[in-house]
Image (cartoon, rainbow, N blue to C red):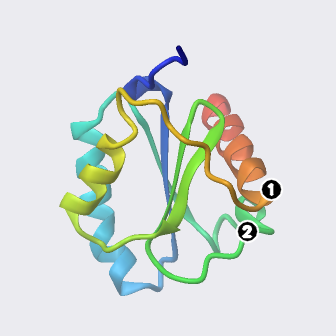
């Protein structure tokens, strides 16, 4: 039987831009969820200020979330900027057997860069 995910295995990254009003409003909600899921690693990424970290991943809409379990991306996409949406999404990856996200290889590389950055912080 595969291992189930613990909260400490989770990386929740929000990819946004400072000029985006929705992102500015959502940032408080995002950090509030970090308090609720305190063992998970929450990372706020400004796609312009941290373009060297994000490129070549294209972020088309905001807010865009990237959730990985250990080093495997499980979710990448735009979400509605509501606390309940974020809570349900993060909770869906706790104590379950996650299904890897089947998308662009660039997302795998972004997860690796985010985890490497977190280890150096």
Q: Quadrant of the C terminus?
A: top right
Q: Which residue is pictured at 76% across the width and 62% down the height?
A: 104
The residue carrying pointer 1 sits among few (fewer than 14), some (14 to 19) or many (20 or more) residues within 10 Å by Cα, namely few
Asked whether the beta carbons under mark 2 and mark 1 sit within 8 Å of each other, the answer is no
Residue 105: give its label: 1
Residue 24 picture location, percent across and down: 35, 75
Q: Please indicate whether residue 117 sits to the left or right of residue 55 in the image.
A: left
Q: Is residue 84 above or below residue 69?
A: below
Q: Which residue is pictured at 51% across the width and 77% down the height?
A: 17
Q: Please indicate whether residue 102 sits to the left or right of residue 68 in the image.
A: right
Q: Please indicate whether residue 61 sits to the left or right of residue 57 in the image.
A: left
Q: Which residue is pictured at 45% across the width and 21% down the height?
A: 4
Real-space Cα separation, disc 2 to disc 1, in angstroms:
9 Å
Residue 10 picture location, percent across and down: 47, 35
Residue 52 picture location, percent across and down: 77, 63
Q: Which residue is pictured at 68% across the width and 55% down the height?
A: 102
Residue 57: give its label: 2
Identify the mark nearer the N-term, 2 or 1.
Answer: 2
Residue 46 picture location, percent across and down: 56, 67
């Amino acid at each position: 039987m595969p291992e189930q995910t613990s909260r400490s295995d989770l990386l929740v990254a929000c990819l946004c831009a400072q000029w985006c009003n929705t992102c500015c409003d959502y940032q408080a909600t995002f950090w509030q969820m970090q308090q609720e899921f305190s063992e998970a690693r929450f990372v706020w990424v400004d796609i312009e200020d941290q373009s060297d970290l994000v490129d070549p991943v294209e972020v088309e809409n905001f807010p865009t979330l990237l959730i990985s379990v250990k080093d495997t991306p499980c979710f990448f996409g735009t979400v509605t900027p509501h606390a309940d949406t974020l809570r349900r999404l993060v909770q869906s990856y706790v104590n379950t057997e996650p299904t890897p996200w089947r998308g662009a290889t660039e997302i795998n590389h972004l997860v690796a860069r985010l985890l490497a950055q977190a280890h150096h912080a």
